[in-house]
Amino acid sequence: MTDASTGLGAGEPGGAAFGPAPIDQPPPALEAPPTTRKGGSRLGRYVLVRFLLMIPTVLILVTLVFFLIRLTGDPITAALGGRLPPDQLQERIHEAGYDRPIVVQYFEYLGQILTGNFGTTLTDNQPVTEVLATYGAATLELVVYALIVAFIIGIPFGMIAAAKRDRTPDAVLRVSAILFYATPVFFSGLVAKLVFSVWLGWFPVSGRAGVRTELALQREGLDTGLYLVDAIASGNPAYVGDVLSHAVLPALTLGLLTAGIFLRLVRTNVIGTYNMPYIDAARSRGVGEARLVRKHAYKPALIPIITVIGLQIALMLGGAVLTETTFEWQGLGFQLVKYLAARDFVAVQGIVAMIAIIVAVTNFVVDIVAAFLDPRVRY
């Protein structure tokens, strides 16, 4: 059927079906695509759900810590029992409220946490929040160093293993990855100290910086807790070099643990990406294998890395306890071991609860970043 004014068929270009939109209707391009609105609503719903799930996660972890510690009795008896006369011990227990019903103590502890009060240590009478602020920066610095090592080693070597699939370099890298995350952190730390500090003398044995550097930074009023930041702020390259030399072995010890996981993840996902149609299309156009890995296959393989970063940070915080003890790195892990030895369960409870909160918040942030990068996560 033809249009009376043009003589063209309704289905032909220029016909009524392809003509301009009526004047009283907006052009189609001005209307927001329904998929965009749906995607935005899905993202908002996903963020809300993840945030709401974070609350019971933290609550369960804090509850477990509270009741597991109470299995040994009240913290004051655990820390001071045998060192105080029974009457003074009972007086201390009563003053602290540990003779009240356990349920009452639990809800009071939850209320304290909501106000940012994690209690006071029994051995040195410090607020746990001060301990967290003083030593938390050292642990944060170590975790950042370790993540850098994990990214530098895990991602490039994972790509190489995928490119050399089922050949000798791939086999060597896969075995290395297994060794990285299967070797206990304290053992690899001791071996690293023996080889690189004692035998070769390349790096310091322990500590976060030399005594001269620490004293110099304190004299200059640089006390953020982040030694590298303080050293850079001082403007003295010698201080920066000293801080970095102390960080190499702890960062390698803790970072290789996660590097092995990253390496295998990247390898597996790059190999999976090789089977995608757009890779076959690029290969048919003559794109070389090295360019395929570097330009096309590795980006989708990074999304699983992002999604597991939260879990890896939790693993690193656990490994930091052994790493800091091995290298006498004055962080939360080092202090946690000291408080455990002193049976100061108030301090232990506060530190573990804070670590649980950090891990939960980190997982929440990582999930949101992953949802932005990969829309499939939102479904």
Image (cartoon, grey):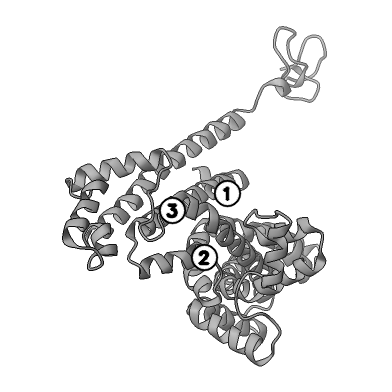
Three-letter amino acid code of the residue under disc 1: Ala
The relative height of residue 8 versus residue 96 in the rendered view (above or below) is above
State the separation of the CA atoms marked 3 and 2: 26 Å
Three-letter amino acid code of the residue under disc 3: Gln
Q: How many marks?
A: 3
Q: Which residue is mark 2?
A: 316
**Residue in front for this viewpoint, 166 or 125:** 125
The relative height of residue 366 versus residue 293 in the rendered view (above or below) is above
Judge whether residue 286 can be spotted in this image: no
**Residue in front for this viewpoint, 358 or 92:** 92
Q: Position of residue 43 (x, y in %)?
A: 54, 37
**Residue in front for this viewpoint, 334 or 148:** 334
Q: Position of residue 79 (x, y in %)?
A: 29, 63
State the separation of the CA atoms marked 3 and 1: 39 Å
Residue 288 falls in image quadrant: bottom right
Q: Earlier in the sequence, mark 2 or mark 1?
A: 2
Label 1 Cα crowd, 10 Å radius (few <14 / some 14-19 / many 20+): many
Residue 328 located left or right of residue 246: left
Which of pointers 3 and 1 indicates the residue nearer the eye? 3
Residue at 72% x, 66% y is 293
Residue 231 falls in image quadrant: bottom right
Three-letter amino acid code of the residue under disc 2: Met
- Quadrant where the N terminus sits is top right
Q: Position of residue 29 (x, y in %)?
A: 73, 23
